[in-house]
Image (cartoon, rainbow, N blue to C red):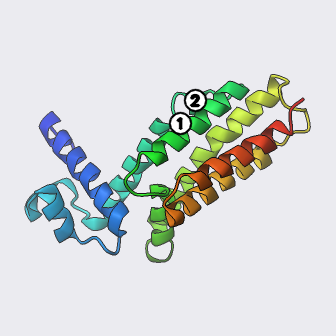
Amino acid sequence: MKLTPKGAATRSRIVATAADLVLARGIGGTSLDDIRAGTATSKSQLFHYFPGGKAELVGAIASFQGERVLDAQRPFLDALDSWDAWESWRSAVVDHYGSQQHWGCPISALAREALGNDPERAGELAAFMDRWRGYLQTGVARMRFAGILRPDADPEKLSLSIFAALQGGLLLTQTMHAIEPLEAALDGALTALRAAAA
């Protein structure tokens, strides 16, 4: 659907507001009526921008949250080729999640809820998680290529370990309503990465 600049701005506003509602209440706990009330839009307006209804809107929310999460880690996420870059990335992640009203990772929260109810959406979210981990894997590979890490350092295994620590830290941060679990998880992951130093 081709939108005017005003229409695109309205659609973006609906997605951003709905994303916060869904993050707070979950997909199942957020109705279209809730979204209409929260975004001050009519039913016809909502279906104009999202003719596929709630499923299409949730897809837009997932994309929005995904880009928001990645943008918060930039520019460090795109250039994880030194110890300073990894430490800056760690700080960016902690700063981003520490500033959020709702603790935890919006992408993994959406993925958990979609797993049993919306296989297509769950697949899209899993692909996003793979893309996110891919940035970490590329960074580890760059470090190995530059001779900062040992030749036997496995970028896939190390990046998976870092990503698992990140997601586990975010889950504990959400349940404990404190940023310390995320800080500890990332510090542990980077300590493990340093153990592979050349």
- The Cα–Cα distance between marks 2 and 1, rounded to whole angstroms, is 8 Å
Is residue 159 among what the camera can see?
no
Q: Nearer the viewer, residue 186 or 134?
A: 186
Please state the horizontal and vertical placement of residue 185, each as a whole percent of the image: 67, 51
| Residue 183 numbered mark, or none | none
In the depicted structure, whether residue 64 falls above or below residue 59: above
Q: How many marks?
A: 2
- Name the residue at 13% across, 37% down: 6
Nearer mark to the viewer, of 2 and 1: 1
In this figure, which residue is indicated by the disc labeled 1? 92
Q: Nearer the viewer, residue 192 or 149?
A: 192
Judged left or right of residue 167, residue 177 is: left
CB-based contact (under 8 Å), mark 2 and mark 1: yes
- Name the residue at 46% across, 38% down: 72
Is residue 104 among what the camera can see?
yes
Judged left or right of residue 59, residue 144 is: right
Q: Quadrant of the C terminus?
A: top right
In the current view of this chain or complex, which residue is farthest to the bottom?
116
- Name the residue at 16% across, 34% down: 5
Judged left or right of residue 185, residue 51 is: left
User: Which amino acid is tagged 1?
Assistant: Ala
Q: Mark 1: which secondary structure?
A: helix
In the depicted structure, whether residue 116 falls above or below residue 73: below
In this figure, which residue is indicated by the disc labeled 2? 76
In the depicted structure, whether residue 36 falls above or below residue 133: below
Q: Mark 2: which secondary structure?
A: helix
